[in-house]
Amino acid sequence: MGPLGGAVEPVRRRAARYRVHLSVRYETAADFVREYAENLSRGGLFIRRGRGLTRHRDVIVELELPGFGSFQVHAEVVHVITPEMAAEHGRAAGAGLAIRETPDGFEDALSNYLHRLGRRADSLVLASAEPAARLLVAAGYQVAPVTSPDTLGEALAAQSADARLVGVVVPGGEVDPYRIAAADQAELVVAMDEPRQIDEVLVQLDARL
């Protein structure tokens, strides 16, 4: 048992890792930093960029699990990918952290959240703009393009039997034409004008999983 109420086993390489676009917050020597985790497992996470994080450092990380609450966990930085290493190997720069100690309720919340992430991988979102598509892919959804309301009917008809359509993400000014084109599936159309709205959009999409 740790000071936060519980402990987890050391991270296992065989633990399933899920793509995610998850807001995290941690303290550096200078300030609190907010970044995004790009993958998550029961044992750890990878934080893109990871400003101020160095190998073997112990750090308290605040994880926001949408729909399940916010939790502070104790973690250890187990590896760091510098921008130079990232450029050389075609990887993303950042830091990999192993979760060492957790508060009460975290394990159940994380288990349910990871189950949701698994369902994202089996779900499809149509997107009309590249920034939205990129963020949705990073969050673990299957994504296909839709170029205009006129092509939406064809895109809806071409859905894969292996993936259930849960949303059509378009700029706010195009919502009405897309909803008209979607007819009886109009409720699937979700507005997104700026990348900072991705968390709100994910909440809406996840509610349909």
Image (tube, rainbow, N blue to C red):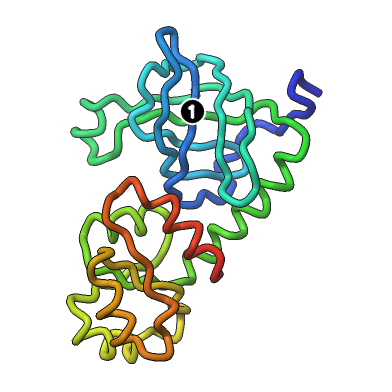
Q: Where is residue 27 in the image (x, y as percent from the top left)?
A: 49, 17
The one of 29 and 15 positioned closer to us in this rendering: 29
Res 170 → quadrant: bottom left
Query: Which of the 4 quarters of the picture holds residue 99?
Result: top right
Nearer-the-camera pick, 132 or 8: 132
Q: Between residues 167 and 2, which one lies in front from this camera angle? A: 167
Q: Nearer the viewer, residue 149 or 176?
A: 176
Numbered-mark total? 1
Q: Provide the residue designation for mark 1.
A: 25
Whether 52 is drawn above or below 97: the answer is above
Horizontal and vertical percent position of residue 136 = 36, 58
Measured as percent of width and height from the top left, residue 8 is found at 71, 33
59 lies left or right of 163? right
- Residue visible at 28% across and 61% down in the picture: 133
Quarter of the image that includes the C terminus = bottom right
* Name of the residue lying farthest toward the top: 29
Give the x, y percent position of residue 156: 34, 86
Residue 133 in the figure: left or right of residue 121: left
Residue sitting at 37 percent across and 90 percent down?
Answer: 183
Query: What residue do we see at 67% from left, 54% from top?
Result: 112
Q: What element carries label 1?
A: strand
Q: In which quarter of the image is the N terminus?
A: top right
From what the image shows, is residue 83 above or below residue 118?
above
Q: How crowded is mark 1: few (under 14 residues within 10 Å), some or many (20 or more)?
A: some
Residue located 33% across and 53% down the image: 135
Query: Type of residue at label 1?
Result: Arg
